Every structure is written in structure tokens, then in C-alpha cells.
Image: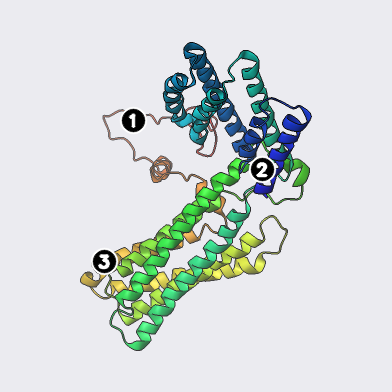
Amino acid sequence: MQSLKAAGAALLAWALAGWWWDAPMALLAPWTALFLVQNTVYRSLLSAVQQFAVVVVGTLLAAAAGMLTDNAMAAMALALPLTVLLGNYARFGTHGLYAPTAALFVLAYGTYTGPEIAHRFLETLLGAVIGIAVNALVFPPVHSRRIRHLRAQLPLLSAELLHDVADGLADGLADGLAEGYSEEQARGWYDRAQRLTDVVTDLREQRRWSEESYLANPGLRMRRRSAPARPKATWDFVWDQVTEHIATTIRTLAEPARRPVLSSDALDALTVLLREAGDTCRSDDYWHRAEGHPVDDAVPARDFRRSLARASAAHRRLTDVCAGQGRTVASTTAGLLADTRRLLSVLLRIADPEAALIPRPSARRHATARAAAEPRPPAASGTPEARPVPAPAPHSPHRRSPLRGPP
């Protein structure tokens, strides 16, 4: 679609500048319009400012060099190094190349009088206006489809990986393997876990494009009145943690130096834990598909709580089994127990990603509150009784709730 829009903008600019206006440098209008149909409306506006600025500077430098030297070759030797250096300025981005290009056009055609320079600026400005208008008013680009695709894939891929690890542990236990799985299996699981983090990275990049596509986009109100709302960024934060803890757990199983020594009972508990954790990940797909639609979520919410409760019970059983095998075995499984506990704690936030960003009162504040509520022992005889310090009022500016903003 963007390619067709760019071609249409160039044709429209040529029709106005070359056919209707018969401008002396009509080529500049379609040339500018063609390159200003960008992936977002905001990017078109930004590119227009950058491109027009470098074209103006390049044209003025070339005209000054031509008037000073009155020789095309000498003017190029004077103007091109300056315009190329200007084009390498980072703030101009990829449009910095237009500064030496504009200088070459001016000096090659020998058109650097006042009226000719004014025509160049007007035709460039005309092309910029046409390119921005076409991009903003004709099917304005909104990049949210890729985000929704990744959001649908990430829970399913995570659940599939956890189920495959659980099935591999169960098969190894049935085959009588001492550790329940082979080193080659563990490396394959870890490679897949790393690919999950790549999906999260791709999701962040698509999130930036999506946020930019909603900026300065007048076509949203005209064409997308029934379009779904933007996906919330808090979901990305939660699943960034989920994939990180999945990778950490599998790395503990894969690295020979960190591989825990597990009995058959511990392997069985770990198998149940990972399988139920995979079911919990898969339940997020329901909330993703139902987002923005009124649905009865009693059944999936119940399944989510059951899966998470069974995973927590399996973690407690794994902890008890490992603790009963002695200190030596417990020391090798401590990392695995900590990794799976962190995984379960972040899975709890799937149903309510907003809860992941709400700050919680610190333990120190709880301890201070408990100490203030406990009765003080009476003062010893001969010493003055300590006068209690009054607590600040609830609305005192010296003490504010962590959920309230600045006054």
C-alpha cells in the first residue's frame, strides 16, 4: 500500500508542477513527494523538515560557490566538501545526502540566480506538502497488526516450550535416565528459550513503530472509528519477565556446572510444575483474544487459578523432596528452586498486567508501622518517660502514599 501511495504522490506532484504549472524545475516536486511517503505520518513530517532544510542549505551553498567562482568545476570543488560534511550530521539522518545532491543539481545546470533558486524551493515545498497529505489522508499507516500477531504467538510459544520440557523430563524418567534428560535435549530447550527473548525484542521494536504511527495521524478519526484500541505496554513488561525466568530455569537445567541432582520424585514434581506453568501461559491467549470485547471470563479465570495452584503445589512438593535429600543435594537444587519460584510469581501477573507496575510498600515501612502499634514498656524509675512522637496526619505533606503523585 505504501508503495502505491508513493507512486501516486509522485504522479500528482508531477501533474501539478510539470503539467499544470509548467515549472522550470518540475522534477523536484515528484522527487520530493516520492521520498516523503514514509512508514508513519510522523516520520513523513520529520523527514519533510529534514529534507527541506538540507536542500535549502545545499542550494544556497552551491549558488554562493557558483557566484564566487563563475566556474562549475571550481564551484563543485568548493561546495561539495561542505555539503557532504553537512550531510553526515546525525540529526539529518538519511536525508543528509540531499544536501550534496541539491548542490550538484544547481551547479550542473548552472541555475543559481535568484528566481531559479526560489523556484527550486517552491517546487520542493510543493512535493513535500503532496507527499505528507497523501500519506496522512489516504489509508494512513497504523502499525499494530504485527504487535497483535506477536502477542498471540508469545504465550503459545512459551507454553509449547514448557510442555516440551515437561514431556522430555517425563520420557527420560520413564526410560530410566539418571538425570531425566540428556545434555543435548537441554541445549535444544535453551536455544528455544533464547528465541523467546528475541520475540520480546521484536515486540519492543514493533511497539515503538506502533506508538509513532499514532502520532500526528489525522486519518485515524476519519477511517478507523471502529478500530481496536492500542495494545497496552504493560503486557510487554510482564512477558519480558516471563521469558527471562523461563530462560533462566532452562539454563539451570542445561549448564553442566549448574545442573541439579534430582531424584525421581523431584523430577516428577518438576514435570508437573512445568506442565502447569505452560497451561498458565496458554491461558493468556484467552485474555488477548477477548481484549476489548465483553465476554464471560469465569471459566478461563477458573482454569488459570487451578493451573497456577497446581504449579505452586508442585513447587512445594519439589522443595520438600529436595530438602529431604540432605544438604549436599539441597545446595545443588537451590538455584532451580529459586528460578521456578520467580517464574511462578511473575505468572501470577498474567491475568492483571497492570498490577506489575503498582509499587508496593517496603518491608521497612511495614516494620515501622508494627513497631509503632506495639505497646511500649514503662520507663524505668528515676528516668523521665519518653514522650511519644505524634504520627503525621494522613494528609500531611511530610508523608504521602506511594500511589499518590506530587502535590
Determine the secondary structure under disc 1.
loop
Looking at the rendering, which quadrant does residue 297 occupy?
bottom right
In terms of sequence position, does the residue under pointer 2 or pointer 3 come before the other?
Answer: 2
Do tag 3 and tag 1 residues touch (Cβ < 8 Å)?
no
CA–CA distance in space, label 3 to label 1:
57 Å
Residue toward you, 72 or 385: 72
Do tag 2 and tag 3 residues touch (Cβ < 8 Å)?
no
Determine the secondary structure under disc 3.
loop
Side (left or right) of 210 relative to 69:
right
Image quadrant containing the C terminus? top right
Determine the secondary structure under disc 2.
helix
- Please state the horizontal and vertical placement of residue 52, each as a whole percent of the image: 59, 26
CA–CA distance in space, label 2 to label 3:
56 Å
Q: Name the residue rendered at 62%, 64% in the picture.
A: 286
Say if 381 sits above or below 261 in the image.
above
Q: Which residue type carries mark 2?
A: Ala
- Please state the horizontal and vertical placement of residue 122, each as a whole percent of the image: 67, 23
Residue 385's disc number: 1
Crowding near pointer 2: few (<14 within 10 Å), some, many (20+)? Answer: many
Looking at the rendering, which quadrant does residue 25 occupy?
top right
- Please state the horizontal and vertical placement of residue 56, each as a whole percent of the image: 57, 22
Residue toward you, 6 or 132: 6
Q: Which residue is mark 3?
A: 258
Inspect this view and state whether residue 308 appears.
Answer: no
Q: Which residue type carries mark 3?
A: Arg
